Amino acid sequence: MRNLFFTMIVTLAAFVGFTSPGSAQSAGGISNVFAVDVNNHGPAFVAEVQKIGALATSMGLPGEQQILLAEIAGDQTNTVYVVIEYASLAEMEAANAKMNATAEWQAFVAWNQDQGISVLSRTILRNIGGN
């Protein structure tokens, strides 16, 4: 529950603090990036994230998901990154609200806690030049 609360607070802060009416209209794509300590449960974590991604797709939610492993990254080597790309912050917020309301999401959060898996950081990136 603490991770979910943290995620919701960060999303709200990012949405309110980093947008303005002018920038929201001309904004590039958004990447929602989670750095995750999988606590030696890498393959199981990937499978669970893929299930959540499939659920999002079946619900018609926007967002392109990637799961990346930092192979050469200093202290962050072996950190797993989950990246979900959206067209806008508003699209991300709406998708997160719908997903967070599902029983499957609640089960995913509980499973992560049971396995000792934790979000190390969350970053929201805006594409300001490029495809």
Image (cartoon, rainbow, N blue to C red):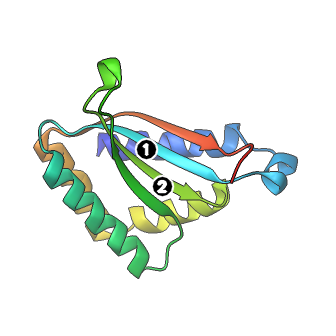
Is 89 rendered above or below residue 99? above
Q: In this view, does 81 lie to the left or right of 124?
A: left
- The residue most toward the top is 75
Residue at position x 35%, y 24% in the image: 73
In depth, the one of 87 and 92 nearer the eye is 87
Per the image, the residue denoted by label 1 is 7
Given residues 50 and 61, the one toward you in this image is 50
Query: What residue is disc 2 on?
Result: 84
Percent x, y of residue 131: 68, 54
Residue 46 figure quarter: bottom left
**Residue, x 20% and y 48% (percent of image)?**
112
Packing grade of label 1 (10 A; few <14, some 14-19, many >=20) is some
- Mark 1 belongs to which amino acid? Thr
Q: Name the disc covering residue 82, or none.
A: none
Hey, which quadrant is residue 80 in on the image?
top left
Q: Element under label 2?
A: strand
- Count of numbered labels shown in the rendering: 2
